[in-house]
Image (tube, rainbow, N blue to C red):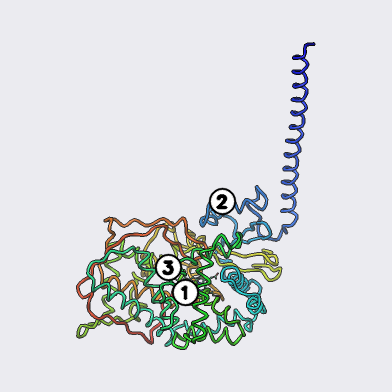
């Protein structure tokens, strides 16, 4: 044998032994993947009680729902509803957690009645800790008792509730907020035609109006640096709540948050709340009476601010967008709100009670915005093993979730045009039956029904009324095109536009007169089952 032949045989020999080694490696990897898969499938099924709602989305154990959530984003639960239309409630298993998703409208009141064992306060406490940076001491106070009315969080809602329900405190709050917006529109009217970015402009008007109304003259958001800090912090809230990444990833947002904390510590030290709304006074009284540390009060103010403005701003944007972009809706809304105006000696006075009670197209458009663009997921934590409706076992620690988009697109509740925006859907029509109010989840429901709903509804309706009375508005491009909403933060209950719209506001005749609102004695608009 030549030297060459010997070496080529040697190479062949080593290639074969490599091939064999690779073969065993692949077989080994594949076998362990198969074994892991079989093990995880077995684990999934062995730890799932037959009485729990049906388990779905299991092709990759514990991960299929995560991939589905990434792929379908806020449409995930609607996609699941279409895939499993017969399931009133189903189970999703994710690493370390099980979520029971509710499809059936009739299960909602049943779940809401179990508020002593299906709890919302742990969700609030978790958000305060993760997104606002609450201290251990603060979290101990919040988590001491999350069930009875003596507990910090349930008692907090009870403390603020009367100040946000129909009555003088709410009228005063709405009066202050709309006064700030009116002044800003006065200056806009005096400038003649003005071009603005619609979302950015509405956001600024509502942020200042709402926070001035709530916090009073010492409102920390009056300082442009603090406003900037809010805009840095706000987009990171969802990621901080998820708590999946280290905090340095959100350096800018955390810096913004810490600047706001300082500003609210200062607000507290100077007792700025004494000149603020009754709402904020009760709020502060509750926090101080329970021994909450000063810095944590400031952190909770930031959480409170999120509740105040995060949903109000996009709701106002969509309401005004849908009124302006549909000429017949604009015409009807203008006619309706014009009837609320009394003019004397150059002063135009708008009766807020009339707007709240006698402007059906305006209110219906607002409510349809909440139905069509609403994307809140009411989440409850199971405090113990329990049965729902005598049929479904909910395990301790599991999350029960009611996605509002599922309810809001339900044909059985809204008819075949459930996917269409119909501004007159909620206008009462003689002889026609009203849609099932339980399927309307714009403000949640049950014990966690949004306490700020009347404030927000009135503020947005009055802002919209004032705007269409005083201005003609056109998109600079000449066409109204609804922005997409794919990037909406799921920390919020309302879709947010991905892009802005350039608009031109032209003062209408009379725009430069003095505009005022009267309040008092009227009922609040009834949009949710609990208020009807
Ligand atoms: C259009 C504006 C608003 C929308 C769409 C909205 C939506 C909601 C929703 C869907 C919930 C229920 C959460 C759940 O059950 O999981 C809720 C709760 C809440 N909202 Fe609002 N909200 C708005 C404005 C406000 C305002 C202006 C305030 C403050 C004055 C406020 C304060 C709260 C609070 C404190 C809760 C928690 C209630 C609890 O813990 O029991 N909201 N909101």
Residue with the mark numbered 1 = 308
**Mark 3 touches mark 2? (CB < 8 Å):** no
Q: Nearer the viewer, residue 394 or 314?
A: 314
User: Badge 2 local density, few (<14 within 10 Å), some, or many (20+)?
Assistant: few
Residue with the mark numbered 3 = 433
Q: Nearer the viewer, residue 208 or 447?
A: 208
User: Badge 1 local density, few (<14 within 10 Å), some, or many (20+)?
Assistant: some
User: Badge 3 local density, few (<14 within 10 Å), some, or many (20+)?
Assistant: few
Q: Is residue 152 left or right of residue 436?
A: right
Q: Which is nearer the N-term, disc 3 or disc 2?
A: 2
Queried on whether the Cβ of the residue with tag 3 lies below 8 angstroms from ligand 1, the answer reads no
Picture disc at residue 83: 2
Q: CA distance from mark 3 to mark 2?
A: 29 Å
Q: Nearer the viewer, residue 86 or 92?
A: 92
What kind of element bears circle 2?
helix
Residue at 62 percent of width and 85 percent of height: 291
Q: Nearer the viewer, residue 69 or 327?
A: 69
Residue 123: x and y in percent read: 60, 70
Q: Nearer the viewer, mark 1 or mark 3?
A: 1
Queried on whether the Cβ of the residue with tag 1 lies below 8 angstroms from ligand 1, the answer reads yes
What kind of element bears circle 3?
loop
Residue at 37 percent of width and 59 percent of height: 500
Q: Quadrant of the N terminus?
A: top right
């Amino acid at each position: 044998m030549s030297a060459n032949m010997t070496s080529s045989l040697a190479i062949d020999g080593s290639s074969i032994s490599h091939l064999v080694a690779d073969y065993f490696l692949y077989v080994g990897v594949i076998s362990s993947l198969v074994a892991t898969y079989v093990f995880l499938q077995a684990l999934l099924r062995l730890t799932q009680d037959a009485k729990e709602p049906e388990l779905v989305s299991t092709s990759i154990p514990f991960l299929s729902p995560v991939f589905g959530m990434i792929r379908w984003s806020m449409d995930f639960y609607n996609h699941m509803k279409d895939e499993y239309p017969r399931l009133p409630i189903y189970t999703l298993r994710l690493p370390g957690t099980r979520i029971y998703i509710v499809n059936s409208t009739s299960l909602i009141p049943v779940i809401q009645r179990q508020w002593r064992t299906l709890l919302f306060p742990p969700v609030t406490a978790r958000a305060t800790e993760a997104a606002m940076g609450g201290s251990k001491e603060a979290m101990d106070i919040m988590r001491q008792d999350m069930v009875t009315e003596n507990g910090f969080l349930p008692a907090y809602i009870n403390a603020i509730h009367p100040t946000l329900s129909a009555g003088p405190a709410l009228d005063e709050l709405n009066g202050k907020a709309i006064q700030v917006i009116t002044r800003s529109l006065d200056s806009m009217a005096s400038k003649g035609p003005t071009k603005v970015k619609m979302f950015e402009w509405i956001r600024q008007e509502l942020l200042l109006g709402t926070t001035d109304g709530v916090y009073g003259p010492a409102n920390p958001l009056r300082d442009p640096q603090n406003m900037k800090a809010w805009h840095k912090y706000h987009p990171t809230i969802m990621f901080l709540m998820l708590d999946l990444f280290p905090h340095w990833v959100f350096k800018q947002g955390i810096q913004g948050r810490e600047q706001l904390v300082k500003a609210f510590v200062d607000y507290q030290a100077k007792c700025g709340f004494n000149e603020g709304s009754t709402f904020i006074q009760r709020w502060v009284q509750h926090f101080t009476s329970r021994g909450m540390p000063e810095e944590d009060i400031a952190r909770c103010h930031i959480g409170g601010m999120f509740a105040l403005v995060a949903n109000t701003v996009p709701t106002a944007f969509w309401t005004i967008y849908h009124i302006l972009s549909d000429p017949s809706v604009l015409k009807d809304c203008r006619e309706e709100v014009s009837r609320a105006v009394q003019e004397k000696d150059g002063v135009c006075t708008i009766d807020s009670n009339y707007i709240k009670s006698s402007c059906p197209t305006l209110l219906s458009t607002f409510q349809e915005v909440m139905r069509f663009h609403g994307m809140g997921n009411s989440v409850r934590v199971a405090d113990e093993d329990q049965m729902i409706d005598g049929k479904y076992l909910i395990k301790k620690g599991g999350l029960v979730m009611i996605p509002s988009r599922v309810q809001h697109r339900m044909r059985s509740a809204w008819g075949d045009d459930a996917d269409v925006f119909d501004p007159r859907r909620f206008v009462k029509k003689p002889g026609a039956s009203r849609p099932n109010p339980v399927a309307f989840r714009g403000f949640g429901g049950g014990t966690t029904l949004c306490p700020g709903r009347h404030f927000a509804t009135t503020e947005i309706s009055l802002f919209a009324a004032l705007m269409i009375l005083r201005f003609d508005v056109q998109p600079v491009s000449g066409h109204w095109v609804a922005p997409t909403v794919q990037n909406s933060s799921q920390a919020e209950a309302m879709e947010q536009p991905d892009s802005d719209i350039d608009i031109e506001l032209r003062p209408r005749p009379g725009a430069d007169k003095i505009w005022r609102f009267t309040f008092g004695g009227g009922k609040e608009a009834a949009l949710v089952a609990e208020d009807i």
